[in-house]
Image (cartoon, rainbow, N blue to C red):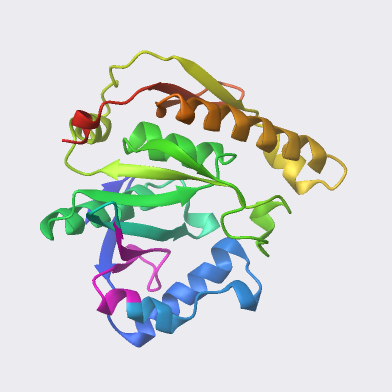
Amino acid sequence: MNETQGAAIRIQRFQLLEEFEECVRLEEAVWGYDPADMIPRRMFLLASRIGGQVMGAFLDGRPDAVGFAMALPAYREGLPYLHSHMVGVLPECRNQGIARALKLAQREDALQRGFELMEWTFDPLEIKNAYINIQKLGAIVRRYQHDFYGSSSSPLQGGLPTDRVYAEWWLRSRRVERALRGEAQPFEVMDRVEVPAAIYAWKGSPAHRAHACEVQRRNALKLESGFAKGLAVLGYQRNEAGDGAFQLGCWDERHTR
């Protein structure tokens, strides 16, 4: 049980078919997908049976889940890890620490089972998600994928290509431990990639969507250029106006431990 801003958050492992119905309900409420893009309950069932994670988040006084997380077992470059495919929270229940509680529950379970790494993808134009992933959780970013999912029916995508970056969460690293304690990360900022807060309005307006597309194209080039030089995203800043900025620096593989 986690206490956050006066609300008690309970994280529960989902294992039954009727519990996976909760995930489908939340999936639709959070992303607003068309039926063709929805993950069915059997996929959540499969994830739980093959070594993945399916977890629900509950708030005191509400009988139904208000958030969920789903991860799948994965393997890359000789390393087994967990890929956290979805973490979603109902719009009316956000900003209460629920997504963070789900990520911490995922981390605890992964560590208990011997995993050193979790990964997930996120939209580099989503300022709040980037801030939480990098600054609050301690993930790093050093890979960019253009149009990862192809066309998306979610209104949140705003009709833009589904460009994504990969968050690497080295679960036992000193960097992650510092982030979870709220401590500053020691690194030299060698480049910045900025995301204007107006990006949300631009994505939601057909008349201004070209501005969002230009930011996406420009930032993709800058991030990929930095990654090609061996840099990684190690920090993320937000200013009073709500603008975001990726901070790139040198990443030493020894920092994964």
For the point 30% across and 43% down, the residue is: 169
Q: Quadrant of the N terminus?
A: bottom left
- Left or right: residue 211 versus residue 23 is right
Question: Can the viewer see residue 5?
Answer: no
Magenta segment boundaries in residue numbering: 47-75
- Left or right: residue 237 versus residue 4 is right
Vertical side of 54 occupied by 124: above or below: above
Spot occupied by residue 193 in the image (x, y as percentages of width and height): 56, 24
Spot occupied by residue 206 in the image (x, y as percentages of width and height): 84, 48
Q: Quadrant of the C terminus?
A: top left
For the point 31% across and 26% down, the residue is: 251
Front-lying residue, 217 or 22: 217
Residue 152 falls within the magenta-colored stretch: no
Front-lying residue, 98 or 174: 174
Spot occupied by residue 21 in the image (x, y as percentages of width and height): 44, 81
Residue 180, quarter of picture: top left
Vertical side of 154 occupied by 175: above or below: above
Question: Can the viewer see residue 45?
Answer: yes
